[in-house]
Image (spheres, rainbow, N blue to C red):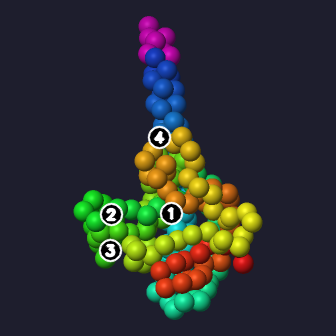
């Protein structure tokens, strides 16, 4: 009769261990997600800075130059520049309302969430962006071949290394070149 109180003890201990294990799994998942969000926010800040520098050169006079220091966050596969839309496609009206027919977009491919972080580059859609023709090894590569994602496969330029120092120059009225300083 005195030992009857201990009969439910092992079962209660098993339930407590299961609850504790599930709490740890959820806790580690949440810590991972917070790290992912923090990394994506750092990438978004980096992308915004890069976009603002391209926009300021695009708005400037011929010969305007600036230098951007671009660091890819650990969670980012790469930054991609893409020229979106021809008149009538309508994609730009949602991505860049100020340039509804044609626009330039910088986007980042996140490893941890699978989402794209997109930034509209506030330059005319008719503006052209090229690698520096005098640079023997262009700073940006072409988009990776064979990628199934239409955004990545359609990108004009891919920045997939961890760190870049990029000279952004308005070399003509409607031409921006990207090169090494």
Q: CA distance from mark 1 to mark 2?
A: 16 Å
Q: Which region is colored magenta?
A: 1-10
Q: Which type of secondary structure does the marked residue at label 1 adopt? A: strand
Task: Determine the residue positioned at 52% across, 42% down.
Answer: 147
Q: Is residue 60 above or below residue 141?
A: below
The answer to which quarter of the image holds residue 83 is bottom left
Q: CA distance from mark 1 to mark 3?
A: 16 Å
Q: Is disc 4 placed on a helix, strand or loop?
A: loop
Identify the residue under disc 3.
99
- Percent coordinates x, y for residue 42 in the rendering: 55, 65
Q: CA distance from mark 3 to mark 2?
A: 11 Å
Under circle 3, the secondary element is loop
| For the residues bearing labels 4 and 3, Cβ distance under 8 angstroms | no
Which mark, by number, is residue 81?
1
Q: Which mark is residue 19?
A: none
**Closer to viewer: mark 1 or mark 2:** 2
In magenta segment, residue 3: yes
Q: Which residue is mark 2?
A: 86
- Left or right for 22, reference 97: right
Q: Nearer the viewer, residue 27 or 175?
A: 175
Q: Position of residue 28 (x, y in %)?
A: 54, 42
Q: Residues within 10 Å of mark 3 (few under 14, many from 20)?
A: some
Q: Quadrant of the N terminus?
A: top left
């Amino acid at each position: 009769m005195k030992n009857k109180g201990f009969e439910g003890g092992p079962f209660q201990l098993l339930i407590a261990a299961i609850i504790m294990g599930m709490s740890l799994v959820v806790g580690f998942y949440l810590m991972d997600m917070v790290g992912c969000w923090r990394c994506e926010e750092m990438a978004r800040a980096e992308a915004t800075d890069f976009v603002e520098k391209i926009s300021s050169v695009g708005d400037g006079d011929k010969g305007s130059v600036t230098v951007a220091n671009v660091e890819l966050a650990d969670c980012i596969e790469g930054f991609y520049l893409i020229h979106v839309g021809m008149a009538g496609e309508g994609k730009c009206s949602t991505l860049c309302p100020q340039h509804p027919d044609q626009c330039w977009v910088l986007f980042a491919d996140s490893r941890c969430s699978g989402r794209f972080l997109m930034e509209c580059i506030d330059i005319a859609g008719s503006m052209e962006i090229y690698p520096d023709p005098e640079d023997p090894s262009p700073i940006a590569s072409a988009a990776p071949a064979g990628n199934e994602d239409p955004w990545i496969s359609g990108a004009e330029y891919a920045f997939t290394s961890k760190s870049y120092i990029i000279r952004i120059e308005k070399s003509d009225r409607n031409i921006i070149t990207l090169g090494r300083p």
